[in-house]
């Protein structure tokens, strides 16, 4: 059985799904997806409690790298290689271009395909797709509250020190 919990952040409410063995979803929403329950006792899923605590620490500025098991679900080998390369090699305060991630992953996925993979990332923030940028700017971002993707991406990168803080 999967469990769901939320944490309020400066970029909106973030929901987390745990199957007890791994974090399977991170999303901007305050209600559980269909088929996922909110445990009556949050401590019933220690992994969910830990993931929510780590998210809080990340937004407080005291956590630089998430350390919870994740399950990327059913993915192609190329998608899994791209997400794994991002998760393992691009740290806080760093960015990488779509083309750079394509090369680093060892796949033959073109830069545009990397963007599609980032948009389908089941565990954003933990696998930091916000750190993948276009060669000529931020690129896109499907995270954050509806219609606020790029604003959220900019905030996250500024929070991590990867972008100078906006003056306006």
Image (cartoon, rainbow, N blue to C red):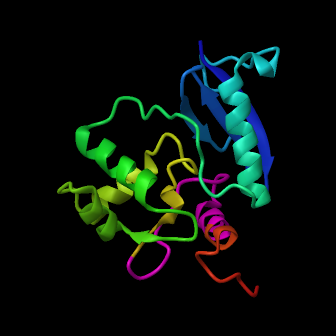
Along the line of sight, which residue is nearer the eye, 19 or 153? 19
* Quadrant of residue 34 within the rendered picture: top right
* For residue 24, side relative to residue 166 (left or right): left
Q: Residue 44, percent across and down? A: 75, 15
**Quadrant of the snapshot with the N terminus:** top right
- The single residue placed furthest to the left in the displayed view is 108
Q: Please check the rendered image and state whether residue 138 is part of the magenta-colored stretch, yes or no.
A: yes
The answer to whether residue 31 shows anywhere in this view is: no
Residue 70 screen position, x and y as percent = 50, 35
Q: Residue at x 82, y 16 (%)?
A: 41
Main SS category, magenta section: loop
Q: Residue at x 71, y 54 (%)?
A: 58
Residue 75 in the image: x percent, y percent?
32, 35
Nearer the observer, 84 or 74: 84
Q: Is residue 95 above or below residue 47?
A: below
Q: Is residue 98 above or below residue 80?
A: below
Q: Is residue 122 shown left or right of residue 52?
A: left
The outermost residue toward the bottom is 167
On the rendered image, what quadrant is the C terminus found in? bottom right
Q: Is residue 23 visible?
A: yes
Query: Is 72 in front, or is 37?
Result: 72
| Span shown in magenta | 135-156
Residue at coordinates 48% horizontally, 56% vertically from top-left?
129
| Total labels drawn | 0
Judge left or right: residue 151 versus residue 109.
Answer: right
Q: Is residue 18 above or below residue 50?
A: above
* Residue 91 place in picture, x, y as percent: 51, 62
Is residue 116 a member of the stretch shown in magenta?
no
In the depicted structure, whether residue 168 falls above or below residue 26: below
């Amino acid at each position: 059985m999967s469990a769901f919990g939320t944490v309020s952040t400066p970029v909106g409410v973030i929901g987390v799904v745990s199957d007890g063995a791994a974090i399977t979803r991170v999303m901007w929403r305050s209600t559980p997806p269909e088929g996922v329950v909110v445990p009556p006792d949050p401590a019933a899923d220690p992994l969910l409690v830990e993931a929510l605590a780590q998210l809080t620490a990340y937004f407080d500025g005291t956590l630089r790298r998430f350390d919870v098991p994740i399950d990327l679900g059913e993915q192609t080998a190329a998608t899994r290689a791209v997400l794994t390369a991002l998760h393992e090699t691009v740290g806080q305060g760093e960015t990488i271009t779509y083309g750079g991630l394509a090369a680093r992953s060892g796949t033959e996925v073109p830069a545009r395909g990397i963007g599609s993979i980032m948009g389908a990332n089941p565990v954003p923030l933990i696998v930091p797709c916000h750190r993948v940028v276009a060669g000529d700017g931020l690129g896109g971002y499907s995270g954050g509250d509806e219609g606020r993707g790029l604003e959220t991406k900019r905030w996250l990168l500024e929070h991590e020190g990867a972008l100078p803080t906006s003056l306006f």
